[in-house]
Amino acid sequence: MKVNKFGKVVVGVDGSPSANRATEWAAQEAELRNAKLELVHAWNYPNLGYGGYVAVLEDFENDANAVLEEVAAKVRSEHPNLELATALVQGPTAQTIIEKAKEADLVVVGSRGKGGFTGLLLGSVGQQLVHHCPAPVVIIHLPADKEIDQE
């Protein structure tokens, strides 16, 4: 019986091109290592001030879930033998991934997500993970010609 010392790869997803590339890399790595892949999508309520925004806030969670399910469906279709889990978490992205990393052997993220400045080589989530993550971190960049067109 083959002993699997590499149990789980966690990848941060947000629907951005960089995160999509990171997800594909993580899926391939999980397959090579016979490991479980966990897709993690953290989301936050926007700062809308005070008032009756309940219906609008539910839309944000539904949108976040739709992103996660779309990515999961793609991974399942391209990697049907891969053990896959998903986690939709309301909270700060870096903190959420760091928490998930406590039970992971490897964490994978894109070099930058949907927000921030397009010229940055590394987004804020990647920077926080490099400094605080309890598991090894792999940061995946888009090819140079795609970095500019990421939006």
Image: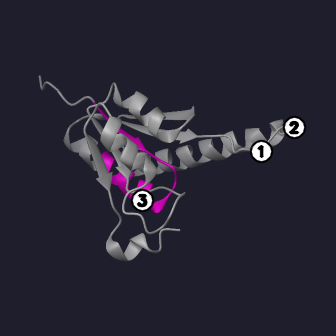
Q: Nearer the viewer, mark 3 or mark 2?
A: 2
* Residue 58 rendering spot, x and y as whole percentages: 75, 38
Residue hosting label 1? 48
User: Residue 27: where, in percent of width, then height?
Assistant: 32, 46
- Name the kind of residue labelled 1 in the image: Leu
Which class describes the residues within 10 Å of circle 2: few (<14), some (14-19), or many (20+)? Answer: few
Neighbourhood count class around disc 3 (C-alpha, 10 Å): few under 14, some 14–19, many 20 upward: many
List x then y, in percent, for residue 42.
Answer: 53, 39
Identity of the amino acid at label 2? Gly
How far separated are the C-alphas under marks 2 and 1?
A: 8 Å
- What's the CA distance linking mark 3 and mark 2? 35 Å
Name the kind of residue labelled 3 in the image: Ser
In the image, what residue occupies the spot 57% across and 34% down? Answer: 91
- Quadrant including the N terminus: top left
Q: Is tag 1's residue or tag 3's residue first in the polypeptide sequence?
A: 3
Other residues around mark 1 within 10 Å, as few (<14) / some (14–19) / many (≥20): few
